[in-house]
Image (cartoon, helix red, strand yellow):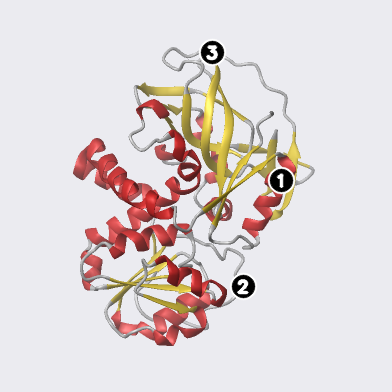
Amino acid sequence: MHLEVDRSDLHHVRAVAHPPAALGPGEARIHVDAFGLSANNITYAVYGDLMRYWECFPGPEEDGVQWGRVPVWGFGDIVESTVGGVAEGTRVYGYFPLADELVVAPGRIDDRGFSDLAPHREAVPSVYSRYSVTTADRVYRPEREDQHMLLWPLFVTSFVVDDFLGDHDLFDSRTAVLSSASSKTAIGAAFLLAEREGVDVVGLTSPGNLDFVRSLGCYDTVLSYDDIDGLAGSPSCYIDVAGRKDVTHAVHTRLGADLRYSMVVGDTHWDDATTGEGDLPGPRPEFLFAPVQIAKRRTDWGRDGFEGAVAEAWDRFIPWTDGWLSIRHVAGAAATEAAYRKVLDGRVDPRTGDICTLARS
C-alpha cells in the first residue's frame, strides 16, 4: 500500500495497493512499521523538485499526473533479504515513502547499518539513504520510538541550526529570532540556542499559539507576527522556519543594519501567498542545507564525535518534551491521509505529534 500525491497539487492524494515484487539478487524487503508525520514532510514535498526529494521514491506518471511518494522517517523490519550482512528480523530506522514496505539495495554495510544503493537515490545526500540498525544506534531507546520518529530528523536540523550559528559566533550578534516558533524544528533550535550563554532567543508565532510558545520556557521573548515592530533593535540573526514572505520582509525592515544573518530553514507556511512588498532590506537570506554542515562537522570532529555531540544534545532535549508533547497514533490509509491533510493545511495542534502506520495488521 502506498499513499501517493500529485506533485503539482499536494491536496490530490490517492491510496494504491501494489503487490509485493519478487526480490532480485542484492535486495532486501523492509516492512515499514510506523513513521512520523509533521510539517517537515510537507517541506520535502514542497521542495521535492528543487532538492530532488521526489527521486528517493519515484512515483508513476499516469493520465498526465506525475505521482510522488512523500518521504517520511520511521522504523521498519527486514522481512526478506538476499544480501549477506542484512539479516531478516533486523529493525532499522530511516527514510521511507508513505507505504507499508520498501525494497532496498543494501550496500556500504557495517555494524551500524547500511545504505540503499538503488540508482534513483544517488541524487540526494547519503543521509537520506542510510538505514541505522537499532541495536547499534546510540540514541535509540525502545520506549522512545514515537519521539524518535517524530522528532529525531527535526532535531538533527535544529542541532545544525544551532551549530551553524555557533560555528560563526552568531555572526557577531547575540539575538536569535525564529519564525514559526511553535514548530518542532524551531522549538528544538530554541532549546539549544537558549543553552548558549548570553544569547537572547526570540520567537515569532501566530496569535493563537502565543500562550503555548510562551509556556515552553525556551524563548526569552515571544511576539506575534502582528507585533514584529516590537523586536528590539540589536544585532540579530533571523532563522526563517515559517517561509512567510511578509514576515521575512517585516523582520528585515525592522532590524535593518542590525540584521547580521538571515537563514532559511523550512517552509511551514508553504502555501503562503503574501508578498514581501518590494526589495528586501539587509542580508540576502541563505538556505541552510543541513547535510553540508553535517559533512563539515564529521570532518572537524570525526563521525563518532559528531554523532556523540548530537546524542548528548538529544538526551537533554527529549525528556524536556514530555512536559508538552502528546503523541497521537493513527492506522490505515484513510486515517493517515486525513492526518497528512491536517498537516498540509496547518491544522495540527503544536502540542501534538502524529505517528502513522500503513502496515497490514
Q: Which residue is mark 2?
A: 273
Q: Residue at x 44, y 83 (%)?
A: 228
Residue 13 screen position, x and y as percent: 73, 48
Residues at marks 1 and 3, CA–CA distance in whole angstroms: 35 Å
Mark 3 Cα-neighbour bin, 10 Å: few <14, some 14–19, many ≥20? few
Q: Which residue is mark 1?
A: 335
State which quarter of the image contains the N terminus.
Answer: top right
State which quarter of the image contains the C terminus.
Answer: top right
Image-based side of 96 in relation to 166, left or right:
right
Q: Residue at x 66, y 36 (%)?
A: 358
Residue 15 screen position, x and y as percent: 74, 40
Residues at marks 2 and 1, CA–CA distance in whole angstroms: 29 Å
Between circles 2 and 1, the one closer to the viewer is: 1
Figure check: 296 above or below 344: above
Foreground residue among 188 and 284: 188
Foreground residue among 41 and 220: 220
Q: Residue at x 59, y 70 (%)?
A: 272
Secondary element under disc 1, as helix, strand or loop, is: helix
Foreground residue among 189 and 235: 189
Image-based side of 256 in relation to 167, left or right:
right
